[in-house]
Image (tube, rainbow, N blue to C red):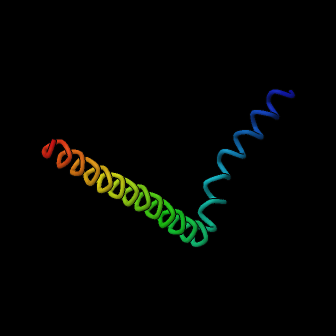
Amino acid sequence: MNQKSALLCILFMTLSSPWLRAADTGEDFFQAIGKMYVVVAVILLIFIGLAWYLFTLDRKISRLEKKQKYE
């Protein structure tokens, strides 16, 4: 009997879960938008960091090439 009641409880939770999520879609939508902006900001920071690194690396390589050319 205990297994049947546990199975019935799990079945009820599984079936009622989508209806509970559908009731508050407006709040979830705005939370998803906020998270999207965070992801875009992180990707933008990574891109800016990589661009800065490549720019400084290019300057260092240019200096080394000029130094080697004059020697």
Residue placed furthest toward the right: 2
Which residue is at 46% across, 64% downward?
Answer: 41
Reply above or below: 16 against 38: above
Near-viewer residue (6 or 26): 26
Residue 32 horizontal/vertical position (percent)? 53, 64
Q: Please tell me which residue is depicted at 18% across the width and 45% down the height of the picture.
A: 65
Q: Is residue 25 left or right of residue 58?
A: right
In the image, what residue occupies the spot 36% across and 52% down? 53
Q: Position of residue 21 (x, y in %)?
A: 62, 59
On the image, the x and y values in percent for residue 37 come to 48, 67
Would residue 1 be found to the left or right of residue 46 on screen?
A: right
Residue in the image at 26% along x and 54% along y: 59
Q: Which residue lies furthest to the left in this view?
A: 69
Q: Quadrant of the C terminus?
A: top left
- Which part of the image, by quadrant, shows the N terminus? top right
Closest to the observer: 10 or 63? 63
Q: In which quarter of the image is residue 12?
A: top right
Side of 68 relative to 13 (left or right): left
Position of residue 4 measured from the top left corner of the image (x, y, whole percent): 79, 30
Q: Which of 70 and 61 is in front in this view?
A: 70
Could you tell whether 5 is left or right of 13 in the image? right
In the image, is residue 51 above or below residue 26? above
Tally the numbered discs: 0
